[in-house]
Image: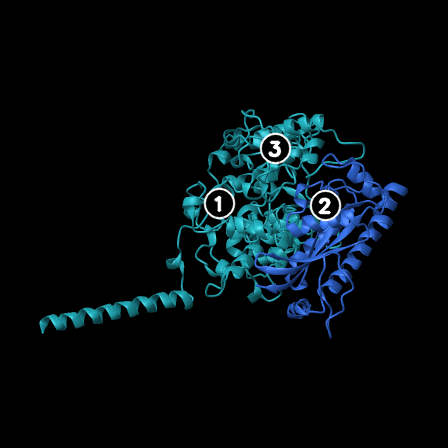
Chain colours: A cyan, B blue
Amino acid sequence: MASSTRRTLIWGLWLLLSAGIGLALGYRLLGGAEQTVFMPGEMSYAHHQFGVDCQACHGEAFAGGEALQAACLDCHGEQMRARDDSHPRSKFTDPRNAALLTRIEARECVTCHLEHRPEITGPMQVTLPIDFCANCHQDIATERPSHEGLGFASCADAGCHNYHDNRALYEDFLLAHLQESPVLADPRLPVATAIAPHGPALTAMAADHPPTHALSAEQFAAWAGSGHAAGGVNCRDCHGGEADLEWVAEPAPAACESCHGAQVAGWRLGRHGMRAHEELSQPLPPLAAADARLPMAPDAPGTPGCTSCHRAHDFDLVHARVEACLGCHADPHSRSYADSPHAALWQAEREGRAPPGSGVTCASCHLPVVERAGAEGEARWLAEHNQSAHLRPNEQFIRPVCLNCHGMGFTLDALADEALIERNFTGRPAGHVDSLDMVAARLRDAPTPAGGAGTP
Amino acid sequence: MMDRSLFAVALATPALLLTACGGGEPAAEGGITPKQMADALHAVMEADRTVYTRRVVNRLQNKEQVIQASEHFEDDKALPLPAQMFRFGAEMVAENEAAGFTYSLQSLWPINDQNAPRTEAEKTGLQFVADNPGENYYTTEALGGTEYFTAVYADTAVAPACVTCHNDHRDTPRSDFEIGDVMGGVVLRIPVGGS
């Protein structure tokens, strides 16, 4: 009898516990609570910042593979098109590739980029064995005898090939840059196009803040000396409307967006602003410096918005280009900047000893000034605020950044030298990338007939 | 989008006997056959391709010499090659799953090896249109669990720009093309059954 009662009690407790756990998990899944309890593994460096928002990738109540693919493209699709993706999905939807797809399902991003699998995640967030090119290109040595004997694990070696972006690595491009010096004759980076003034230049006397929101003398002076005042941007243009109640003490990036749309859009796609990306189910608070995966200064303020780097009121671009970055980033590459040749060039430009564009700052490489079509199709030069856009693989820096000042051979060697990168390019590349030599040899062995061209 | 089941019915109709070099099969009542659809699509492709080759590339590059055509047309500030224009269109159609067909430009003498025939139907079809000028090749094939009506049309050199570019290219496996030669083929597929 006692045994039977105990059994009933155990069953009852088990049922109660099961129901409780079920309800708790159900609430977490469907009730809007944080869902990280379901996370099957640690998030990758690319996505960990919004890892608490499962729906950002998986859709409503885990909508399935199509939603997952759509989520990848929501954030990365435009960038892939801009990169002139060498392996777009459309290359694989032709039925003639059906046999290839049984070896590698190249139509889906997750075939190569699985999330939650840190134990198999390699460079570029690739979760396949690194020799995956062999699935389709096993006869490459027939097409390119120079590749005979090269292992498929070496295809993506620095300076050789990338799966998606080969704009700086295709044969004719290398050919056009065969004989270049380590430093070009007029090494200068592009300068951003000035934004059209909002109105006539303003003085401190013209500031239109409401009397209830007094500013300090320093704030006045900062604004009056800023590009905003020179361009006719008054207090209310950023802080709010006519009525005092509409005044916003600390305007969000959305306030900046009306004039700096491309920059804010880029910021939301990069590491600094992805927690405010519109594809998240709700904006997340700025990442605490302690949660960053790169080494950060202990007192790093984090990246809540535009003013974190640009500062409020003076919007000092000099500050934003170096000091703002080094206020947070404390990795060896960042800490080596001050003593680098690039920093010396920037110092010379700041002191007026060198022309605009000749100095190299953190922003010069990580937020490079790139050409973008304006509203009327006109060319504009803007700072790319998605600082992840060129970061990995680092050959993406070649065209918008490195080749403005350096020859291709030096550039390839430098970008392949991880120790040199860590020293912030202080010194010379230790190794050599063979790509240019291979192109030169092929040109010698199989010269282009008159008027002909090579293959990408 | 064409109703795929209509094509399946049309294929199963005894009156529609697809042969290797295709004849003038009667249309299924109330609809069109896959062959008719393929021929119509190819007529548009061929016309657009010829117009671009003759009236844009050949005129501006070879005759008036005002701009070059280049496979790196963005870097070279040049015109896309006719084959690239054709491929870009094929890729846009490939992205549109509602289009109900796919097509590609291939060759027995490809500059890029990825454009060599891959399936048995492609190999047989490209050889057929090269050996039989003026004729098309039609067949069905199963790929990835789906049955396709596959048509292959000859791609013929219509302007000097075609032969000079192919003959002179560093990667060409053949450099004796002349105007009027079959240089490759357009492979067009319409799904007609299976999953």
Say what secondary structure mark 1 lies in: loop
Q: Is residue B58 left or right of residue A434?
A: right
* Residue marked by disc 3: A346
The residue positioned 75% from the left and 56% from the top of the image is: B21
Upstream in the sequence, badge 3 or badge 1?
1
Q: Is residue A204 visible?
A: no
Q: A264 and A116: which one is in front?
A: A116
The answer, for residue B91, to whether it is visible in the render is yes
| Callout 1 amino acid | Leu
Tell me which chain the residue with mark 3 is part of.
A
Q: Residue farthest to the right?
A: B64
In front of the other: label 2 or label 1? 2
Label 1 crowd bin: few (<14), some (14–19), many (20+), radius 10 Å: some
Residue denoted by label 2: B107
Quadrant for the C terminus of chain A, please: top right
Residue A403, placed above or below residue A219: above
Q: Position of residue B92 (x, y in %)?
A: 69, 56
Q: Which-is-in-front pick, marks 3 and 1?
A: 1
Q: Residue flagged by tag 3: what amino acid is it? A: Trp
Q: CA distance from mark 2 to mark 1?
A: 32 Å
